[in-house]
Image: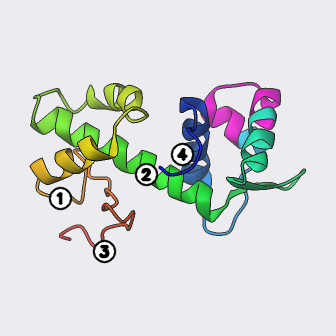
Amino acid sequence: MAGPALTDSIQDYLKAIYKLQEGEARVSVTALAREQGVAAGSASEMVKKLAALELVDHAPYKGVRLTPAGERVAVEVIRHHRLLELYLAETLGLHVDDVHDEADRLEHVLSEELEARIDRALGFPTHDPHGDPIPNAALEWPKSRTG
């Protein structure tokens, strides 16, 4: 991820907004707080920080939407998470029910070099062990399940 180093918390918020965002719809701060398991005031403060970093577009009382830069960070974190889940399951033999929490911890510290090596070692997978799509290195989503 280019630009300033983004904290784990910032990355988690961006990933949550991406998950909650539907097309051009805005995500309410209340929904974001609920998703993150925090008070609405905490989510509101983070939204202000994300807006100052130009990672979200925030319209008070109307919600928040990722900017292209914010979406890029969110998709990259999702890519890291899903590659790690697959690696942990297939290479290290962790049970599929246990890979999510481990991937949550590791997704923020995965270097681009290690990401590329894991991707290559797994044969450039298109889906994680749960069947969710994995964006490719260009952060493009797979076209189909067989992709």
Q: Residues within 10 Å of mark 2 (few under 14, many from 20)?
A: many
The amino acid sitting under disc 4 is Lys
User: Does the residue at mark 4 contact the one at mark 3 (Cβ under 8 Å)?
Assistant: no
Query: At 70% from the left edge and 64% from the top edge, which residue is drawn?
Result: 25
Q: Going by the image, does 140 lie left or right of 120?
A: right
Q: Position of residue 89 (x, y in %)?
A: 16, 34
Look at the image and say whether residue 40 sits in the magenta stretch.
yes
Q: Looking at the image, is mark 4 or mark 1 nearer the viewer?
A: 1
Q: Which mark is residue 15?
A: 4
Question: What residue does disc 2 label?
Answer: 76
- Identify the element where label 2 is drawn: helix
User: Does the residue at mark 2 contact the one at mark 1 (Cβ under 8 Å)?
Assistant: no
**Measured Cα–Cα span from mark 3 to mark 2:** 17 Å
**Measured Cα–Cα span from mark 4 to mark 1:** 22 Å
Q: Going by the image, does 126 lie left or right of 35?
A: left
Question: What residue does disc 1 label?
Answer: 124
Question: What residue does disc 3 label?
Answer: 143
Seen from the viewer's position, the closer of residues 39 and 82 is 82
Image quarter where the C terminus lies is bottom left
Residue 41 visible at all? yes
Query: At 66% from the left edge and 61% from the top edge, which residue is drawn?
Result: 67
Among numbered discs 4 and 3, the one appearing first in the sequence: 4
**Measured Cα–Cα span from mark 2 to mark 4:** 9 Å
Magenta region: 32-44
Residue 130 visible at all? no
